[in-house]
Every structure is written in C-alpha cells, then in structure tokens.
Image (tube, rainbow, N blue to C red):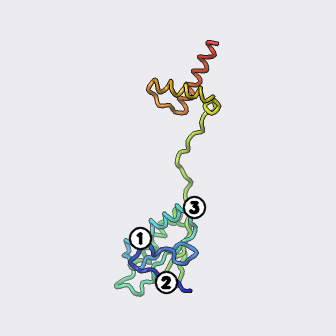
Amino acid sequence: MRKRKPPADQAASREAWGRVHPVLDLHGLTGDEARRRAEQWLRDRQAERVRTVMIVTGRGLHSQGIPVVRNEIEHLLALLKGTLVVRWESANFGGSFQIELRSPPPDTAPRAAPEPRLLREAPPALRLRAEEALWDLGIAPTPALLEAEIRRILDEEGAEG
C-alpha cells in the first residue's frame, strides 16, 4: 500500500511519513525559513537522542528563480558540524540530506545533594523536634540546618544526661 504525502500547507504533518528516520520536508519555504526551521528541528531531535535524520530540500527544479533551500541547508550543516552534526551526505538524487547527529551533551543540571546520614538515621520524633525548633526561630529547615539542629539537640541532651 502506497502512503499519501501530506498537504504542503500542514507543516506539522510534513515530518516522518513512513520512514525509518525522522524526516523534515522543507519544500515551499524560503531560504531563511528553511534554515531556522531546520536548525531548531535538528536541535529538538538531538535532545530526543535521535541519531540519524533526513532533511528534504528538493533539488530546486521547480523553484521560481535561483534555488536556495538546498544551499542554505548545506551551509547550515557545515556550520553545525562538530557541535550538533557528526556528518551528512546527499541522498535521494540530491533532493535530501541524511544527517548523523551528535549525542546531546550530558545533563549539567545540578543534582540534589544526598541527605546527610545523621538526618536519614534520626528518629522521626527527633527530626520533628529539630524542624519545629527551626520554624520557631523563623528559619525554613534545609537538610544542612536540620542536621545542625539535630546535632545541637543531641549535644544538649548528652550534656544533661
């Protein structure tokens, strides 16, 4: 069964029509539009950890005037090589590019520090007492402050006993 192509005016449905790899079809766009859309699309696919994609530019045979989309995309790929793009090659008799994307950079978001051991091992009643003591002072309890308050309470009780 042959798949029907999506209508040209529906940009969202111009992606991934029966392919193994995601496909972006840039037919009918200006050079600037194609470049902006392609760069964002490539970044989105990289963030999704997609390794190989296709961008269809057409060969420019039906363009009014000088065909620019293919040249714009080739220039964009050259600029992105090494950062976003590993390599690319012309495909489909010059009407598209098959592109290998780099793996996205590792997540650099700060990770929450593990809860201090004393805080993890403290009995719930002691932890609650430390939280209440901090709130009474108008201090929002953080793990580090809770640990310090638990130490203070334990030291105080050790000195009394």
Q: In this figure, which residue is indicated by the disc labeled 3?
A: 103
Q: Secondary structure at mark 2?
A: loop
Q: Mark 1 or mark 3: name the one nearer the start of the chain.
A: 1
Toward the left, the furthest residue is 65
Residue flagged by tag 2: what amino acid is it?
Arg
Q: CA distance from mark 1 to mark 3?
A: 21 Å
Q: Residues within 10 Å of mark 2 (few under 14, many from 20)?
A: few
Instruction: Mark 3: give few (<14), some (14-19) or many (20+) Cα within 10 Å.
Output: some
The disc, 1 or 2, on the residue closer to the chain's N-terminal end is 2
Instruction: Tell me what residue is drawn at x 59 percent, y 16 percent.
Output: 156
Quadrant (top left, top right, bottom left, bottom right) of the N terminus: bottom right
The percent coordinates of residue 37 (x first, y second) are: 42, 69
Tell me the element at label 1. Answer: helix
Q: What crowding class fits label 1: few (fewer than 14 Cα within 10 Å), some (14-19), or many (20 or more)?
A: many
> Which marked residue is nearer to the observer: mark 3 or mark 2?
2
Residue 158, given in percent of the width and then of the height, sits at 63, 16
Which of the two residues, 32 or 128, is positioned nearer the viewer here?
Answer: 128
The residue located at (49%, 67%) in the rendering is 42
C-beta proximity under 8 Å, tags 3 and 2: no
Q: CA distance from mark 1 to mark 2?
A: 26 Å
Q: CA distance from mark 3 to mark 2?
A: 33 Å
| Circle 1 residue | 35
Q: Which mark is residue 122?
A: none
Instruction: Please give the residue where the numbered disc 2 appears in the rendered image.
Output: 4
Q: Quadrant of the C terminus?
A: top right
